[in-house]
Image (cartoon, grey):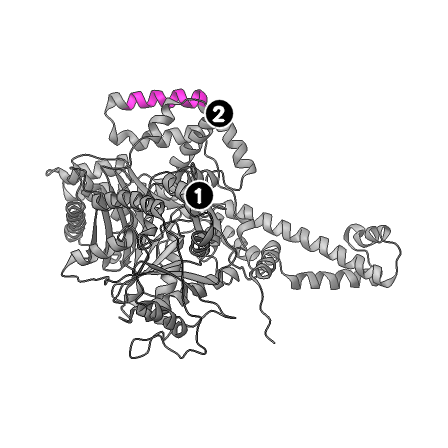
Amino acid sequence: MVFSISPGEKQCYNSIHNGVYPGHYRYLCVIIGLVAAFHFNGYGVPLNMTNKILRILPGDTLPLQLAACFLTSLIYWLTAIYILRYILKLLFMYKGWMYESRARGAQISMKTKLWLVLVKIFSGWNTPRLYSYQGSLPRLPLPSIHDTMIRYLRSVKPLLDEEKYKRMEKLAAEFENGIGKKLQRYLILKSWWSTNYVSDWWEEYVYLRGRSPLMINSNFYGTDALLLHPTKNQAARAASTINSLLVFRRLIERQELEPILVQSLVPLCSWQYERIFNTTRIPGLETDKICHWLDSNHIVVYHKGRYFKVIIYKGRILKPAEIQIQIQQILDDTSEPLAGEEKLAALTAGERTHWANTRTLLFNKGVNKSSLDAIEKAAFVVALDDFPYEYDPKDPSKLDNYGRALLHGKGYDRWFDKSFTLCVGSNGRIGFNAEHSWADAAVMAHIWEWVITTETWEIRYDEAGNAAGKPEFTPPAPIRLKWELRFEVQNAIETSLKVARGLISDIDLRILEHTNYGKGFMKTCGLSPDAYIQMALQLAYYRDAGKFCLTYEATMTRLYREGRTETLRPLTLESAAWVKAMVEDKIPGEERVKLLRIACEKHQSGYQDAMCGKGIDRHLFCLYVVSKYLEADSPFLKEVLSEPWRLSTSQTPHGQTTRLNLKKHPNCISAGGGFGPVADDGYGVSYIIAGEDLLFFHISNKKSCPTTDCHRFARKIEEALADIKQLFLQYKSANGVK
């Protein structure tokens, strides 16, 4: 007889394990033995705890004495765990290590050395599971209003002339000395009683209360490893990827996935991993909600306008060869979609309030409700496209079209509400479209890296390109979902589709593959690769627009419990000074290099501040939310929160698994992913440092804006990168530096 553990039992076991971390049950056994030995040999137990417990018990028989020893040991053990956890939390509050150089040969302060030793001692008592560190992570610190005002004013100085800057200084001073004090007091209270003073409001007000379409505006996408094309068999690649995702889900459920440790020592918050699978965003009239189910034994597959429920668990996760049979059955199915069924998912691509009304009125009973439940409660959705995802270095338009297919598709072939939709091209390439409210892109990047590296870590395909291995049984056949799509539903679908098509026709996307050099050369310049690229973007934008703009770079705050992101403002006084030096002919190269180093150091310092809770924008956002709750008007906050981010940027991280070795497997790196522009007259730029000599930029803009052009901006980025390289080559040559 085979006994299986339910997800609820697994969750209970893991909760107990995490609850006692960094302690371990074996230490409880040791303490029980010691307490019993002391008690029965007549030695005094600390605090005379055993005898105090015996006074409460009805007698002093041997079983009751053993019970008293056990309870005493339990109290000692739990107290020790609480002390250890509190010490760990205090240690993790120290962020001095963030500001110390990690270059080879760099000196580490004695304070940080001592901190390193203590962290290793106090976190080495037990092997951590995925969520083990959650109780030891510190809360996100709340900056003072004065510090935030100083940082804010400094960040906007390059954008304002003297008169406008003085006006902003006055507004900031009035806010700091006036209503700001009251708002800060309320925010201090929230920071005391909430786990994270930002995250719940950020999720609700930035994401869930948004009424505009998710497609392009909020959702993001990720691409395959372009140089890794293990099979052209669509069913086989889909099956292998589905299996890998399900194995990853099991690692999360069992908490066997290792928490990410910065410098192999400091944990990042793992909270966002809880809602990767079995999760859907449900539309509401005023605000949406995120629904997560504990378990799901099926996925939903979309192909040629039809939806199929596919059982992927039968006592165990189905093997790739078994899933391939199911996928092939769907591909071979010649049935036609019902009227309206093909474009049903357009409802998730349109306005949220319209979708909420339609869902309430027309999907609240019968087959429509049961079929919608199947989609929303699925582990994830798979879209089998009937066209290839192409890549050709000699034809950039193919990669652009690949990105567009993942960003928005046809506007009706992705379930945009789902935590993510796995997309599979007819030629076996894969990608995903992810909803943003449940987590940030770094979490999806982690999953995606794990999925892609599985293709090289394991033998996944045979010589014919089919999934490796043999099926052990005939898997359950896919079940075609049924719908009753009356005239009202079809009208609602067309309304959303019209909105989706309008968005699609207005978006432009360019994926730039930069092969001239990568982080290898950047490191020889002694600069942070991220800072280097951000300076290139500043130079490119200035040349493109003839002016500076407010720039957004997403950084993470996952060094704190339930941390998500903070905004880093790459436009600084230092970066502006360097850009101006680059566009002026008379500035010598040595001065330009000096200014670039200063700008990059300032950028790196700002990045560290943002990660350590010393950012600008999340604090201002929360103050604004408090002002709305209190109905307190603030001209300063209104103006600040309405400033457009004309250059919104983000770096896609990699190396989050221990399996990615680009030297051994350079083909395993994904080309990254992208998103739509935040401002109507701005750019969305996502980039990935894909290797020593490779970068990818995903650049988007709106065609309706006459001043932006992603293809032109891509050329400006290439020019900026080339100019910076040439600048350093000339500098090194002139100074005899290799």
Q: What residue sits right under mark 2 in the picture?
A: 630
SS at circle 2: loop
Could you tell me which secondary element the residue under label 1 belongs to? helix
| Stretch of the chain drawn in magenta | 165-179
In the rendered view, does 114 fall on the left or right side of 584? right
Q: Which of 36 and 445 is in front in this view?
A: 445
Amino acid type, callout 2: Leu
Which image quarter holds the C terminus? bottom left
> What residue is pinned by disc 1?
360
Q: Which of marks 2 and 1 is in front?
A: 1
Q: Quadrant location of the N terminus?
A: bottom right
Q: Where is residue 305 in the image (x, y as percent from the top left)?
A: 31, 58
Against 214, residue 264 (above or below) is below
Residue 346 in the image, given as x and y percentages of width and height: 32, 49
Task: Write down the quadrant of residue 736 in the picture.
Answer: bottom left
Q: How crowded is mark 2: few (under 14 residues within 10 Å), some or many (20 or more)?
A: few
Q: Residue furthest left?
A: 585
Judge whether residue 218 can be spotted in this image. Answer: no
Q: Report the residue that reaches farthest toward the front.
A: 487
Within 10 angstroms of label 1, few (less than 14), some, or many (20 or more) residues?
some
Please, what is the three-letter code of the amino acid marked with disc 1? Thr
Q: Nearer the viewer, residue 628 or 307?
A: 307
Residue in the foreground of this view, choosing between 691 and 392 = 392
> Counting residues from the N terminus, which is met first, the one under dot 2 or under dot 1?
1
Q: Is residue 173 magenta?
A: yes
Instruction: Tell me, yes or no, if residue 530 can be seen here.
Output: yes
Residue at 38% in and 70% down = 326
Q: Estimate the x, y position of residue 231 in percent, counting from the top left.
A: 28, 71
Query: What is the x, y in percent for residue 27?
Result: 66, 61
Is residue 221 covered in magenta?
no
